Amino acid sequence: MEIFVANIVLYGLWLFWSFRNRDECSAFYIFSVAMYFVVACIGVFVFEIGLYQDEISDHRSMEYLSFIPYALMFVMMAVVLYPLKAIPKFELGWEKRRVSRCSVVFLFLILAHLLFYLYGFQFGLVTDAGDAYYMSASGDLGLRYGSDVEVIISKILRRLSICVMPVFFYLQFYRISKNQQAMMALLFLVLGFCAYVIPPILNGSRGGMFFDFFIMIYIYLNFSSEIPVKMKKLLYAFVILVLLGLVFYALVVSVARAKGDSDVAVFRIFRYFGEPFLNLGLVYWNSTDVHTYGVRFFPKVLEWVGGLELPDSKYGAEGLREFWTHIYGVNMYYFKTLFGDLYMEFGVIGSYVVVIVLALVARFVKKLKNSFLCHFIMFYYARNVVIYGIFGFGMDQKIVVDLAYAIVFWVIFSRFWNPVKKQDESLEKLG
């Protein structure tokens, strides 16, 4: 128990230091440290009341607990968060009309993808939110299209939506901060966010909803100092309503999974956020000699190199977890933290190699003059590495492929549809 308390002290001191040095630390940097501090506190709570021990039946006894993984996780988060200590400003330089037109086009693509998603979603199979989650995890609940053409359209709309979604949000906050049709931009934010969270809601995913909410905070904090006070009040009202709605739905999902027992549902939400640090020391640390060095995150690599076919998404999350549980000999159903997940895959040294490379890439991306590409990549770094790092490593094969398509999209977009760049090039020629 003392080790869990010491873990709280570590993040508490880090939070205190970052807040005292807030002139040198971005708001999101401080927010992220605070988030990890809260998760560490919840972990102690669920362990103290015995909830963790009741729910996680295959944890090891306290005699196996070591402070080493917690120290390694703490250092890893310091490395991962360092590139976000200072976040570059979203520079655009577009005229008001072009920003407005791009916002409309991007929103159209986002809503078109949502509508086509709803068209292919199997509503009839679902009786409640609990069923939706379990059927989604097993692979029984998903998108169904009647022809190859529909499948192709779905993939195109999905790729385009992934490309424009983060930048769409940036553009709306940019319009609000510059007072360019601010109320319209706020309405677009509401519509865009609804489109963003509907898929995880339909799948009964509590985590997906809150990840999407927290990453919106990341974008907002990039503009918070420039947004007028009046608009901030409206944004805060919207945030409160959204948060209350997400909490309500999370309770609905949890009650459905707990077979109607509301008390169990509430405690399981606490366990959900409190277990990662506990699992790190009591389930995963020093529990296996098997490290698959990226195969779990990027199974296609092994298929290309060795010709061995591994389970893919058609088996559902449950099937994949069972497969890797058999490989490692350790239960892969539980949250592991960023270090725990990478440690299982690469070992201690390999896990640090991965995060150092990621941090260096993030530092390089910050220096890009292409504001679209810079902030798009930083968005996913913040979402899938920092925020998701509470639970595990979020940069798997699917995400990386999506990012590759999106990077090509924004390189092309910036080359042909960036009037500021073209104007600068024309001035250079005249000079």
Image (spheres, rainbow, N blue to C red):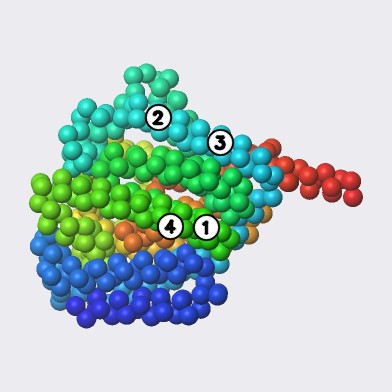
Q: Choose mark 3 or mark 4, whichever is in front.
A: 4
Splitting the image into 4 quarters, where does residue 285 fall? bottom left
* Distance CA(mark 3)–CA(mark 4): 24 Å
How far separated are the C-alphas under marks 1 and 3?
Answer: 24 Å
Numbered disc in front, either 4 or 2: 4
| Among the two numbered marks 4 and 1 on one chain, the one whose residue lies closer to the N terminus | 1
Helix, strand or loop at disc 3?
Answer: helix
Picture coordinates of residue 400, whole percent (x, y): 45, 46
According to the image, label 4 marks what residue?
Answer: 236
**Label 4 with label 2: CB-CB less than 8 Å:** no
Closer to the observer: label 4 or label 1?
Answer: 1
User: Which residue is labeled 2 in the image?
Assistant: 115
The percent position of residue 55, horizontal first and vertical second, equals 13, 59
Q: Residues within 10 Å of mark 3 (few under 14, many from 20)?
A: some
Secondary structure under tag 4 reads helix
The residue wearing badge 1 is 230
Q: How many marks?
A: 4
Gap in Å between the C-alphas at discs 4 and 2?
28 Å
Q: Of marks 4 and 2, which one's residue comes earlier in the chain?
A: 2
Can you identify the residue that label 3 sits on? 104
Q: Amino acid type of disc 1? A: Lys
Rendering coords of residue 247 (x, y %): 27, 53
Q: Residue at x 35, y 77 (%)?
A: 12
Residue depicted at 61% across the width and 47% down the height: 180
